[in-house]
Image: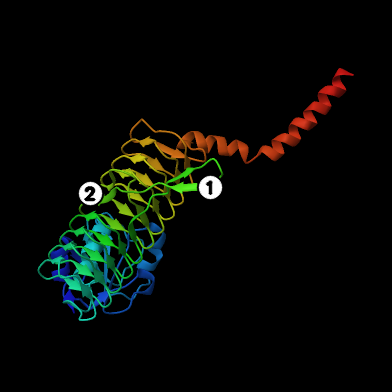
Amino acid sequence: MKITAKLLSKILNGTIEGDPEAVVFGPSKIEEGKPGTISFLSNPKYESYAYTTEASILLVAKDFQAQKPVKPTLIRVLDVYASVAKLLEYFGEGKPSWRGIDEQAFIDPKAEIGEEVSVGKFSIISKSAKIGKGSVIYPQVFIDERVEIGENCILYPGAKIYRDTQIGNACILHANVVVGSDGFGFAPQQDGHYKKIPQIGKVIIEDEVEIGANTVIDRATMGATIIRKGVKLDNLIQIAHNVEIGAHTAIAAQAGIAGSTKIGEKCLIGGQAGFVGHIEIANGTKVQAQSGINKAIKEENTAIYGSPAMPYNDYLRSYAIFRRLPDLSRQVAELKKEIAALKK
């Protein structure tokens, strides 16, 4: 597929500086740009590559001010990242090279399959499952009984969807995601062993949710674990039973959220952050990576840091002190000696 800078600028609602007839065949990273490709600059750390890249077209922000001559044709856009998303969609990134239902897929006769659904080799769609129009089920996906999947969803290889899970429209589940596994519920007995508590709830995932590879979302003990509209989950995240995550919240890799915790809307949570169970996190909360949240956050749009977490600015001030504790301890010991000498 090839496209000119002129047509790309129309698709991306941008303005051109340079040759409008420059032709590209696909995207490339700015540091690896080659003739016939389009690259982008959004992070100032990569600006030096703008002056050396061999890419034919370069996407930049409207307010980008070049410090040296730039060889590629520039397309200036309002939002570089949003434009890159459109660009990759145009060039077909993430679309399967196959369509239709493979003869080696197993679909129960009582399953409901919508129009234009694709199912890859060795995938299993169980009894009473429903797959919406235009959804793509990659090879080796397991979909249990009474699962409902909306329209235009993508389930990548190895995804496992347990019984009674509900998934909305335009959701993306990456490789080896597990949705609906049992919550971690065990009752200690007098003789020291643990008795399993049946997990009879379900998982509800609303529209436009994306879930990264190897992330696990447990079913509720009773009721539902709920992932609201537009949530973005990175790889290797653990969401426990009866958790609720508010709309348009984004969580980075390796975070863990314990049972019955409720995360508000439009929160930003860094990698390896951990949340204890049965707390509520206010809308707009920003949690730095590796923070440990052990109590509720009631004030909206709060930034927190540390383990146990505290307000972000308080943590920075405290860190400036406690990283110097060994030196401060020696100074205190020396002062004690001097005071003792003065007393004598």
Position of the C terminus, as image quadrant, is top right
Q: Which residue is mark 2?
A: 229
**Residue, x 36% and y 30% (percent of image)?**
298
User: Is residue 209 placed above or below 259 in the rendered structure?
Assistant: below
Q: Residues within 10 Å of mark 2 (few under 14, many from 20)?
A: many
Q: Is residue 186 visible?
A: yes
Secondary structure beneath disc 2? loop
**Residue, x 33% and y 33% (percent of image)?**
300
Determine whether, in the image, residue 144 is placed left or right of residue 47. left
Q: 239 or 290: which is nearer to us?
A: 239
Q: Which residue is mark 1?
A: 193
Determine whether, in the image, residue 186 is placed left or right of residue 320. left
> Picture coordinates of residue 155 (x, y %)?
26, 66
Q: Residues within 10 Å of mark 1 (few under 14, many from 20)?
A: few
Which label sits in the foreground, 1 or 2? 1
> Picture coordinates of residue 151 (x, y %)?
15, 61
Position of the N terminus, as image quadrant, is bottom left
> Picture coordinates of residue 229 (x, y %)?
22, 49
Query: Which sits earlier in the primary sequence, circle 1 or circle 2?
Result: 1
Q: Which mark is residue 246?
A: none
Q: 26 or 38: which is nearer to us?
A: 26
Report the amino acid beneath label 1: His
Instruction: Tell me which corner region of the image, top left, top right, bottom left or bottom right, holds residue 334.
Output: top right
Determine whether, in the image, residue 163 is placed left or right of residue 213. left
Report the amino acid beneath label 2: Lys
**Residue, x 56% and y 44% (percent of image)?**
192
